[in-house]
Amino acid sequence: MMSDAIHSRAERHFAPWKNGGGETAEIICVPQGAGFDDFAWRISTAKVEGSGPFSAFAGVSRNLTVLEGGAMSLTVGSGAPVRLDTASGPFAFSGETPCTAELHGAGLLDLNVMVRAPYRCAVLCEGQALPEAAAPCATYLFALRDLPQMGLQKHDLRDLGERVPTGMAEVPAGALLIVIGEESDG
């Protein structure tokens, strides 16, 4: 079933992060009204204005995309730092592994997609072919810039329902496609 609801950037309100170290604006939370400890999936934007640790989320897979502003390096567990900026694309990591961010220059705005097992997500960039996968539980289109042909302004999110629109073979220019599904048993 196609939802086609638009979640406008203009309607978002920022609130403190789980760890109190920054601000987040929730876009989607399933189930609606769930808290940080019991959501199935959550899509939000965050203002990052200082270096420091990320909140831990046991059993949660995270995906982060820098939308605007400066750059940051994420160090996940004992791994090497990964530099993220507006050109780097989505970065997936475990929410339960300790993670620290180091800002490089100005603060930034990022997009966060978090899913709790048994769900998984893919965040696809413009021009990427759509995955051949089992039917998704939810599909969202996030505007990286104004997309008047789609009725979206910069950083709006369109809820596409449980399927990718017919005829969409790749992610449209100026957008990210977020596909959430259940993990398969085999």
Image (cartoon, rainbow, N blue to C red):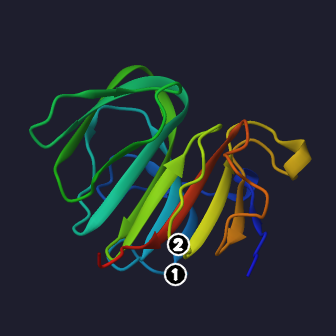
Distance (Cα) linking label 2 and label 1:
7 Å
Query: Which type of secondary structure does the marked residue at label 1 adopt?
Result: loop
Q: Residue at x 35, y 32 (%)?
A: 50
Question: Which residue is denoted by mark 1 in the rendering?
Answer: 33
Q: Residue at x 39, y 46 (%)?
A: 22
Left or right: where does residue 105 sit relative to residue 177? left
Establish if 28 lies above or below 72: below
Establish if 134 lies above or below 31: above
Mark 1 Cα shell of 10 Å, populated few (<14), some (14-19), many (≥20): few
Quadrant location of the N terminus in the rendered image:
bottom right
Q: Residue at x 73, y 43 (%)?
A: 172
Q: Position of residue 77 (x, y in %)?
A: 13, 43
Q: Position of residue 92 (x, y in %)?
A: 35, 47
On residue 80, which mark appears? Answer: none
For residue 186, which quarter of the picture?
bottom left
In this view, the residue farthest toward the top is 105
The reply to whether the C-beta atoms of the residues labelled 2 and 1 are less than 8 Å apart is: yes
Q: Position of residue 78 (x, y in %)?
A: 9, 38
Question: Which residue is denoted by mark 2 in the rendering?
Answer: 29
Amino acid carrying label 1: it is Gly
Mark 2 Cα shell of 10 Å, populated few (<14), some (14-19), many (≥20): some
Which of the two residues, 22 or 37, is positioned nearer the viewer here?
37
Amino acid carrying label 2: it is Cys
Q: Position of residue 44 (x, y in %)?
A: 52, 56
Query: Which type of secondary structure does the marked residue at label 2 adopt?
Result: strand
